[in-house]
Image (cartoon, rainbow, N blue to C red):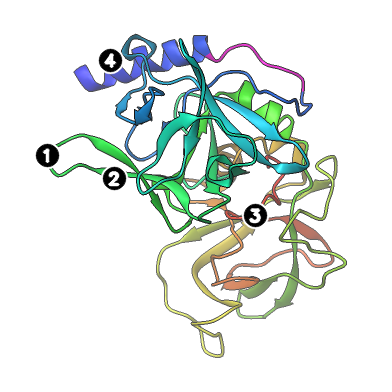
Amino acid sequence: MRSSLKRLVLAIALALTGLVLVPGVASADTPETILFNQYSDRCPDGRSGLQEMRVCAPSDNPGKWVFRNVPGYPERHTITTRTADGDICLTSDDLPTTSKCVAGLTTQQWEVTPLQAQPPLYDLVGLRLKNVSSSNCLDNSRRNFGGWKLVMRGCDDHEYQQWNVYQATYQALFGAPGQHKGMTWANLEQRADNVVHVGYDNATNSNPYSGDTPSSAVLPLLCLRQDGRPAPAGVPTSGFHSWAGGEVKATAPLSGSQLTSRAAADQKCADSFGAGFRMAEFHDGSGWGLWANGTLPANTRFWTAISDQPANPWS
């Protein structure tokens, strides 16, 4: 009960702190934000030098950060916090630290992309932070004697590397969620025994790197429930376009603009078909397509998620 009450208080505090939204237009500096790690529920403190990971409630004084675009490199940002002695930048050393900002220093430059490994808490939105110099991503791990520390690790799609920010910050970086092109898949083969093959058909129709269909389009959402069922005869169980171990269904057609986050899309599947259903994702059949039980309409396309590329309506 105490834990639930603490989460409720934290949710209210964070919601009020991040309430102010900005238009969906990129700017030189974003609004200030915390960096809330999805896995540890901790935030770097923003002080000079090695970063301590703190509870993220405003009363615990977590660091407040500004993303500042690197001139000439629209995909790169410095991640800056203000101190009494001036601005300092998040820097990728052996352990992530903060140091005086230096123009052109690639250890202080970060490629910022959306990441929703798990639905973010407290109405925040998830990011991945990849350092330009090392090509590693900002991560965190437990200390030997308690607490958490920042580390740099090879980039992956797990919640350890999901750093949640205020929606106003996200919108300043990428525009409002639900306005990006989304990736779509097609019904590639429908078998008579209630087995379907759905996936990428060609580069003209499907783009897993930046999306292929405007979010204003109205299409069914591809939903999947995985329960580990065995593959039917003749269906591959490894490699691209393999068995997903479950069943697929398609919602009624809906506008991509309604898909404002992965969590929102997953909820639409659950609302339509019941617990366990979520939006199907590019890698569910090891990439590029999947086989599952189910019957899908022919000659239509389906909104489908991808976790590691900006190719979703919420990207």
Main SS class of the magenta portion in the image: loop
Q: In the image, which is nearer the foreground, mark 3 or mark 4? A: 3
Asked whether, in this view, residue 93 is left or right of residue 215, the answer is left
Amino acid type of the residue tagged 1 in the rendering = Phe
Asked whether, in this view, residue 72 is left or right of residue 32, the answer is right
Question: What residue is at 74 percent from the left and 75 percent from the top?
Answer: 188
Q: Earlier in the sequence, mark 1 or mark 3?
A: 1
Is residue 21 on the magenta stretch? yes
Give the residue number, with chain letter if any, for mark 1: 145
Give the residue number, with chain letter if any, for mark 4: 5
Count neighbours of disc 3 (C-alpha within 10 A) and say few if under 14, some if 14 to 19, many if 20 or more. Answer: some
Q: In the image, which is nearer the foreground, mark 1 or mark 4? A: 1
Where residue 277 sits in the image (x, y, percent)?
51, 51
What label does residue 154 carry, if any? none
Q: Is residue 299 above or below residue 195?
A: above
Report the quarter where the N terminus lies.
Answer: top left
